[in-house]
Image (cartoon, grey):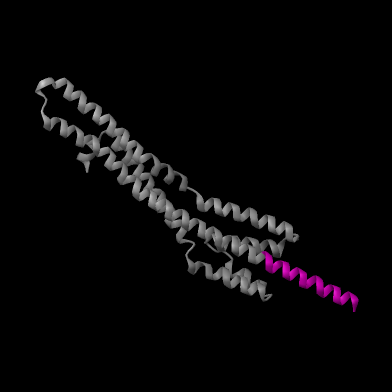
Amino acid sequence: MIDFLVLGGPVVWLLASFSVVALTVVLVKLFQLAMLQPGNGKAVEQSLVHFASGERHQAVMLVKGGRTIRGRLMSRSLALIESADLSLEELRQEATRQARLAVSELASYLRPLEVIATLAPLLGLFGTVLGMIEAFQAMEAAGRQVNPSVLSGGIWKALLTTAVGLAVAIPVSLAHSWLERKAETSAESIQNDLEQLITLQAASLQHTADRALVLKRA
């Protein structure tokens, strides 16, 4: 491994640093998404069931102090409903704002992976071009006494950077696509949670208004 780094020169060292950055980002995203596993969504779903049944205290307690993004958002939204005198439109705006922040958090650090997946093969190709230039310069300097083994050795060293660039880009590109899809799925779950809560709150407000109207007429 060290020999490859030495033979590849600065370009391979740069690609190696890219791979370290990419691995770090992937691990961070995996930890973040682990907090959004389906099992962690059960508390949110049960909380919505209790809220729909009018058991608001139980709904709040189920997600209170939640460590998941979905749980935290649901807890904040329920707290707003219970403690703040917000209209339905104001609640919708606040829920949308919180959902947007959560989606932004889920999409964080994905851009660097995309950049690395794009730049790595280009850097590898750049290193190959530089290596080929050096190989042909060496052949020109040798004149008629050029040794084919020298040329072939220079060429394979030059191609090494392309191979390393592809070796970095392919798994990073796959990881980026997978993580992006997971983030989109989680964002959809968050959006659905908040939409359900707003719908239930709208139904609750309508029911309260209808009861008040009936009592007033009575």
For this orientation, the residue located farthest to the right is 217
Residue at image location 73% in from the left, 56% down from the top: 90
Name the image quarter holding the C terminus: bottom right
Front residue (pair 123, 101): 123
Residue at image location 69% in from the left, 58% down from the top: 92
Seen in the image, is 87 located left or right of residue 24? right
Seen in the image, is 139 located left or right of residue 31? left
Front residue (pair 49, 64): 49
The image quarter containing residue 152 is: top left
Residue 39 spot, x, y in % from top left: 48, 69
- Magenta stretch, main secondary structure class: helix
Height in image: 197 above or below 162?
below
In magenta segment, residue 211: yes
Residue 42 spot, x, y in % from top left: 53, 71
The image quarter containing residue 142 is: top left
Residues shaded magenta:
198-218
Seen in the image, is 208 located left or right of residue 153? right
For this orientation, the residue located farthest to the front is 144
Height in image: 93 above or below 123?
below
Height in image: 122 above or below 55?
above
Front residue (pair 84, 6): 6
Front residue (pair 196, 33): 196
